[in-house]
Amino acid sequence: MQTLHASADPAVLIQRVGALVEAGRCAAAGPLLAAARQLTGQSPELDLLAARIAEGQGQIDLARVQYDVAVDAAPDHAELRKQRSAFSHRVGDFDRAARDAAEAVTLNPDDPDAKALLGSALLSLGRVSDARICLAEASAAVPANPAMREALAVATEADGDPDAAFAILRAGLSRTGGALSLRNAAILFCIRHRQFAAGIALAEDGRMAGTVDACLFGLKGHAQTSLGQHEAAAESYAEALKLGPDDPYVRHLVAASGLLPSAKRAPPDYLRTVFDGYAARFDEHLIGLQYRIPGAIRRVLLQYIDAGNPNGPILDLGCGTGLVGVAVADLRIGSITGVDVSARMLAEAAAKGLYAALHEADVLDWLAEDHRAWNLILAGDMACYFGALDPLLTAVRQRLSPDGWFVFSVEAADGDSWSLQRQGRYGHAKTYLIDALRAAGLTVRTIQDQVIRLEAGAPVPGYLIVAQPAHPVH
Ligand SMILES: C[S@@+](CC[C@H](N)C(=O)[O-])C[C@H]1O[C@@H](n2cnc3c(N)ncnc32)[C@H](O)[C@@H]1O
């Protein structure tokens, strides 16, 4: 350290700290930053590096303090405002992200990065039209920037203009020479809008242009599966698996295609990818598919409520956009708490204003940590993301009050066990369900055949189950 002090050039030292932070080597950057501080004293630049090191090491509270120190020392420093805006966005403080980005735009009205940050923050705040304007200005200034294009497409779609959103992605592909992130966003867009052939064509263009990417092949396989092209899909999945053997999205779809042994549940990262991308269109899409589970849950509750049962508080596991909340809210049987792994699905649920609380978490993690007892636990079309049901049923049993009720749906499967189906959801055989409920200490009150929704025009068969703890205390 002594030698370093004697000979180090502070500017070189600071540059090295910056390079280490960029490379994600925050632990190595820390001591060099301390040395730089001794040589130069405080400076906004060093405060900013300290904040980024803290964030890189997962010390979010410390990082927040460091960003504040940096901005307080130089409130008119546009770069600091932008950095704190980006940090606030990453940690979910969208209001603050928007305020700092707006300040950065005021300080430098020609900076497209500041406008893009402001647009992204406004988008996260649900101000889609304002977001679209900011992102359009940013993207017009830097037409070959894929991230700005992608954000503009998201804002444009959220603003109710899907055709324009797709045109932005397509134009971006030619402007950027086929940027991979834009191509994958365009393919995902096609899948969400059920334009599977267009998605496959986009993936094929990418392959012909020499793109080798696990996600691209995984998406292509997904689109092919949706068109019933299972052999072609298997080839795409095999390619995806070679390129991204550890990618949870790819692994789950590959398992669903039968190329890998099935995992016992869909990985949370896969669920987040799928449902974050689906959230904005979920309600409209499911109505189009005649989704029946929220209505079926309502009917079964009415039947039991007539008999004096059950009463809240209600826990809605995998609440998604809140369709189950919509179906049961007027029954006035208690406040509803929702849990879901997808932040964007939760944002849609929050907008409905029916939930007393919403939590972003995997249901198993959340049930392990929340120790309240619930009189009514609902799970509409969520258990189909678990193969083996025992962890879910056991966790639910532990959180049900002694007279509580658990109402949930599953998709039906042949045989006497569970199986992972091609679309990435699990099906459950009736005998398996009954055994698993009994093993978890739950008694079946009713198990009804229930069409879940339509898929490719055909009904998806399933069951609606009402269960209670096996030995209620009276
Ligand atoms: C098909 S949607 C159903 C949403 C809602 N229950 C309904 O009936 O409209 C499934 C939802 O369950 C969520 N989900 C699936 N598995 C989950 C898990 N292990 N933890 C938290 N959320 C989960 C998904 O993110 C998604 O929002």
Image (cartoon, helix red, strand yellow):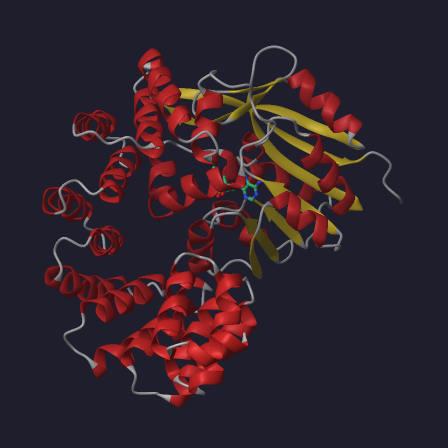
Q: Is residue 129 visible?
A: yes
Q: How many marks are shown on the rendered structure?
A: 0
Picture quarter with the N terminus? bottom right
Compared across the picture, whether 261 is left or right of 281 comes to: right
Compared across the picture, whether 399 is left or right of 274 comes to: right
Location of residue 466 in the rendering, given as x and y in whole percent from the top left corner: 68, 33
Q: Find residue 82 and report its image quarter.
A: bottom left
Q: Find residue 446 and report its image quarter.
A: top right
- Could you say which is closer to the camera, residue 267 or residue 37? 37
Q: Is residue 100 visible?
A: no
Q: Residue at x 55, y 19 (%)?
A: 261
Location of residue 473 in the rendering, given as x and y in whole percent from the top left corner: 89, 44
- Could you say which is closer to the camera, residue 175 or residue 435? 175
Location of residue 456 in the rendering, given as x and y in whole percent from the top left corner: 34, 22
Location of residue 419 in the rendering, given as x and y in whole percent from the top left corner: 56, 18
Q: Residue at x 68, y 55 (%)?
A: 313
Q: Residue at x 18, y 68 (%)?
A: 112
Vertical placement of 441 versus 345: above or below?
A: above
Picture quarter with the C terminus? top right
- Could you say which is closer to the camera, residue 268 or residue 68? 68
